[in-house]
Amino acid sequence: NGAVLEYATIVKLTRTLAIIPITLALAFVRMRREEKENRGEGKTVSLKSVFPMFILYFVAASVITTVITSFCSGTALAAANEVFGLLKQLSKFFIVMAMAAIGMNTDVVKLVKTGAKPITLGFVCWIAITIVSLTLQRVLGLW
């Protein structure tokens, strides 16, 4: 269904774009905290050293994709869509590889030894995200 796909895309993009201000705010908090910790040592902490640069790369890629697809037409647009399609497939592959690497690097014994709090927090977050997602889908009439 085309409408469902459009709503899903909007929800996903909104969630993804929310990462940018949240990351920036957390970087400022971390920078201030590290400045306080290093105040007596004379070390300075820059925003660049605490801000994850992949966020800027993500924004740049989004802008480039939007600009190219907005101004291209005909054969150029078809070529751009083909390139972007390939890049999209590569990005999915790399996401799967990254998730697999994270999973393979997880030390379950160490996780269990840290106690129930982190596991409970993860479970509660998972439940909360599921409830919010399903509620929004229901409210938007997606199912």
Image (cartoon, rainbow, N blue to C red):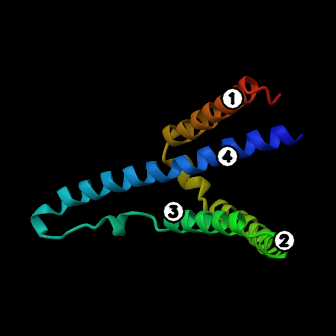
| Crowd rating for badge 2 (residues with CA inside 10 Å; few <14, some 14–19, many 20+) | few
Instruction: Give the position of the C terminus as an image quadrant.
Output: top right
Sequence-wise first label, 3 or 2: 3
Residue 31 place in picture, x, y as percent: 28, 58
Which numbered circle lies on residue 55?
3
| Crowd rating for badge 4 (residues with CA inside 10 Å; few <14, some 14–19, many 20+) | few
Q: Can you identify the residue that label 2 sits on? A: 74
Residue 95 place in picture, x, y as percent: 69, 64
> Quick one: which residue is furthest to the left in this view?
40
Q: CA distance from mark 2 to mark 4?
A: 28 Å
Do the residues bearing badges 4 and 3 touch, measured as CB atoms within 8 Å? no
Mark 2, secondary structure of its residue: helix
Sequence-wise first label, 1 or 3: 3
Q: Considering only vertical position in the picture, is 119 above or below 55?
A: above
Q: Can you identify the residue that label 4 sits on? A: 12
Q: Amino acid at mark 1?
A: Leu
Mark 1, secondary structure of its residue: helix
Sequence-wise first label, 2 or 4: 4
Q: Can you identify the residue that label 1 sits on? A: 136
Q: Amino acid at mark 3?
A: Ile
Sequence-wise first label, 1 or 4: 4
Q: Amino acid at mark 4?
A: Lys
Sequence-wise first label, 1 or 2: 2
Q: Considering only vertical position in the picture, is 10 above or below 24?
A: above
Residue 44 place in picture, x, y as percent: 20, 69
Looking at the image, which residue is at 63% across and 35% down?
Answer: 129
Q: Quadrant of residue 82?
A: bottom right
